């Protein structure tokens, strides 16, 4: 990953892209925890307290050299402990009343507060003192004299020196109680009280001036923080020794730790870690920065490059979130080596665009692929002679982030692969799925199949359908590397992954394919868990894609014995259904005749055809004698097609045992719908 980031930093310089260089210790506040503005007056007392919207939290930075010791934002635990079961129940009762919008008993609440223990011990008070002294002194030293424009941060540091941890604790309790009295909220209860059996969950405070309107900018304003960062960077210590690092650059500062980058979803990511406390890291005789020496300039460029890639406004363009498809925190990054003026949605096309509304995604992959193609071709209409770099980062546990994939492809290959992916996903006969409209109360309609994104393909492969296709569970077996191989791979590796994937789809999803086929024949909506409902429109496309990757094209598929057998059983279902509506007066069995025999057909086609030839005789006899009624035209259509398919199969040698490709083609034949059947 370091090589890719180094090259990206050089590409950004070449493209004159504006990349903000942030000091390693000037870190963004995390958005995950409860956060409050705490307003400090001129005497160092808490004047007010207010919740901080998450959108504001992400814009505030704090100075943090040692983990947990930071300013002007820092974490603290709840202040009071409900130490007995009785007090815990009373606290939960108060929270429930607040959550339901009911007023609280002021006297009873005061009694509860007085009965609780103070949770902040000497260790916590010392940590608060450290936050109000050590980073404050460091900030003041690095900023020096502040101009009137940025005076607010200097004033906040001065007021922080007046704060005593014990007084701060008591004033914070008082402010929270007042807030609960004036505007009760469940979060305030969770902030004030610790009442669960688990470890206390910290909340975050951001200190700000109570009279901030007196200053041109508040202490935590982005303009102030930009100026602070410039000052911090200008006072960074420099090593005057001239040496060359692993990139051939000045090695000044090579002994420092690699910086952390805060990324969406993954949180803090260290560019490289070779901790000397882990003995396994010493197997090559070098540890820490000696294992890969890089100077401060190179590290700064790599850090800035990764921050540039992970900016929120570039979601879908240079990065996408694969977490929900891969069931662990995971990001895919993709970018061209020659940065175009308008970045295409390259990462979204290679990974996933996270659109749960299947209707709006109908042609989304195709639209993205077209935009990516146009961007990579540029104004000359010829694909750029450039590389596309792709790498994937995943959170393995709370501390470790791992590179799961790292590849580069020519821009021409990416454009060609996107085209082939679309062709492969459409490598199916006409198939539609009977589904409800997207709005509540809409009538069912025939819904077209979707082109899966690569991450969605892996999601389908890692899903097991049971209970006649009504229940789905996640499984393991395919990784993000497999998704990249299916989209961008070639040769033997692609053949191996496609062959393994085809076997997995058949093993895990055949019950769903058969359930869809029977529901379609009856004009019913096959009901599934909403989380997995989208797969009904993805899996048939995935079957066609995998067959395409294995060399089977639609024209050839639709003439194979396996496909025709599937089509025959589909027609048998339709004829059986019409028979049930007629002579059986609407009494429809749990399984139609074709559906009941498909499991046998998928293994031994000849046996299933022999069984079908006997069972379909009553329905054929009835159909031939039918002369009146609205259903005559449709019944005659099914009877005619049964005869035509039977005639086609008569002189074709049938497989004794079905291979995976035979089974896939048979399922596509079973799901294929004619115009008459879908209208």
Image (spheres, rainbow, N blue to C red):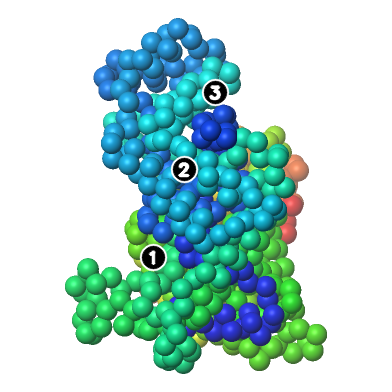
| Earlier residue among tags 3 and 2 | 2
Marker disc for residue 76: none
Residue found at the very far right of the displayed protein: 379
Viewer-side residue, 332 vs 632: 332
Q: What is the distance, in whole Å, between disc 3 and disc 2 at their CAs?
A: 26 Å
Label 2 – label 1 distance at C-alpha: 38 Å
Label 2: few (<14), some or many (≥20) within 10 Å? Answer: some
**Labels 3 and 1: the sequence-earlier one:** 3
Tell me which residue sits at (74%, 90%) in the image: 382
Q: Tell me residue 261's x, y (percent).
A: 48, 65
Query: Quick check: 360 above or below 178?
Result: below
Where does the image place residue 440, in percent across and percent down from the top left?
Answer: 68, 36
* Residue toward you, 526 or 158: 158
The circle on residue 179 is 3
User: Is 545 placed above or below 538 here?
Assistant: below
The image shows residue 487 at horizontal and vertical percentages of: 54, 76
Determine the residue positioned at 41% across, 72% down.
258
Q: Would residue 500 be visible to someone looking at this image?
A: no
Viewed as shown, does residue 544 lie left or right of 112?
Answer: right
Residue at image position (36%, 15%) is 114
For this orientation, the residue located farthest to the left is 279
What residue did someone put label 1 on? 401
Q: Which residue in the structure is indicated by mark 2?
A: 161
């Amino acid at each position: 990953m370091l090589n890719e980031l180094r090259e990206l930093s050089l590409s950004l310089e070449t493209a004159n892209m504006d990349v903000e260089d942030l000091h390693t210790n000037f870190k963004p506040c995390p958005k995950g925890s409860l956060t409050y503005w705490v307003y400090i007056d001129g005497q160092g007392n808490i004047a007010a307290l207010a919740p901080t919207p998450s959108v504001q939290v992400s814009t505030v930075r704090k100075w943090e050299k040692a983990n947990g010791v930071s300013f002007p934002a820092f974490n603290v635990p709840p202040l009071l402990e409900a130490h007995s079961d009785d007090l815990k129940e009373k606290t939960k009762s108060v929270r429930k009343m607040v959550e339901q919008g009911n007023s609280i008993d002021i006297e009873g609440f005061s009694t509860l507060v007085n009965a609780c223990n103070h949770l902040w011990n000497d260790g916590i008070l010392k940590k608060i003192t450290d936050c109000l002294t050590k980073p404050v002194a460091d900030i003041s030293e690095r900023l020096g004299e502040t101009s009137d424009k940025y005076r607010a941060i200097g004033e906040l540091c001065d007021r922080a020196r007046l704060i005593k941890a014990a007084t701060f604790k008591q004033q914070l309790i008082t402010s929270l109680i007042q807030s609960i009295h004036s505007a009760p909220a469940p979060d305030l209860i969770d902030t004030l009280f610790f009442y669960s059996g688990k470890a206390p969950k910290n909340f975050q405070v951001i200190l700000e001036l109570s009279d901030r309107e007196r200053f041109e900018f508040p202490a935590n304003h982005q303009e102030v923080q930009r100026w602070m960062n410039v000052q911090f960077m200008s006072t960074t210590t420099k090593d005057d020794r001239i040496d060359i690092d692993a990139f051939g650059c000045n090695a000044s500062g090579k002994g420092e730790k690699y910086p952390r980058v805060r990324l969406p979803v993954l949180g803090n990511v260290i560019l490289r870690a070779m901790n000397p406390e882990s003995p396994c890291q010493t197997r090559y005789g070098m540890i820490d920065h000696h294992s890969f020496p890089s100077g401060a300039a190179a590290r700064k460029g790599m850090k800035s490059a990764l921050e540039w890639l992970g900016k929120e406004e570039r979601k879908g363009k240079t990065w996408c979130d694969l977490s929900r498809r891969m069931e662990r925190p995971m990001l895919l990054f993709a970018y061209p080596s020659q940065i175009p003026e308008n970045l295409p949605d390259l990462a979204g096309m290679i990974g996933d665009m996270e659109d749960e509304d299947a209707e709006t995604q109908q042609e989304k992959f195709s639209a993205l692929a077209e935009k990516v193609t146009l961007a990579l071709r540029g104004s000359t209409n010829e694909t750029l002679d450039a590389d596309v770099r792709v790498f994937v980062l995943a959170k393995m546990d709370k501390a470790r982030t791992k590179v799961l994939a790292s590849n580069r492809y020519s821009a021409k290959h990416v454009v060609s692969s996107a085209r082939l992916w679309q062709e492969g996903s459409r490598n199916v006969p006409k198939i539609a799925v009977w589904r409800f409209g997207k709005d509540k109360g809409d009538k069912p309609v025939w819904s077209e199949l979707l082109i899966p994104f690569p991450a969605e393909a892996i999601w389908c492969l890692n899903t097991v359908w049971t209970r006649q296709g009504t229940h789905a569970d996640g499984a393991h077996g395919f990784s993000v590397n497999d998704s990249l191989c299916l989209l961008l791979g070639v040769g033997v590796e692609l053949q191996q992954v496609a062959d393994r994937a085809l076997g997995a789809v058949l093993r895990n999803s055949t019950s769903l394919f058969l359930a869809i086929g029977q529901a379609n024949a009856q004009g019913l909506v096959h009901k599934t868990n909403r989380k997995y409902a989208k797969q009904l429109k993805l899996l048939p496309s995935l079957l066609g894609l995998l067959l395409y990757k294995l060399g089977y094209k639609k024209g050839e598929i639709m003439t194979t014995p396996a496909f025709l057998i599937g089509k025959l059983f589909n027609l048998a279902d339709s004829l059986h259904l019409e028979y049930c509506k007629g002579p059986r007066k609407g009494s429809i069995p749990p399984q139609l005749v074709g559906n009941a025999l498909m499991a046998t057909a998928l293994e031994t086609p000849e046996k299933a055809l022999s069984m079908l030839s006997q069972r379909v005789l009553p329905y054929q006899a009835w159909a031939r004698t039918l002369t009146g009624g609205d259903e005559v035209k449709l019944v005659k259509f099914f009877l005619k097609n049964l005869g035509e398919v039977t005639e086609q199969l008569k002189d074709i040698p049938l497989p004794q045992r079905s291979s995976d490709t035979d089974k896939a083609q048979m399922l596509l034949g079973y799901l294929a719908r004619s115009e008459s059947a879908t209208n």
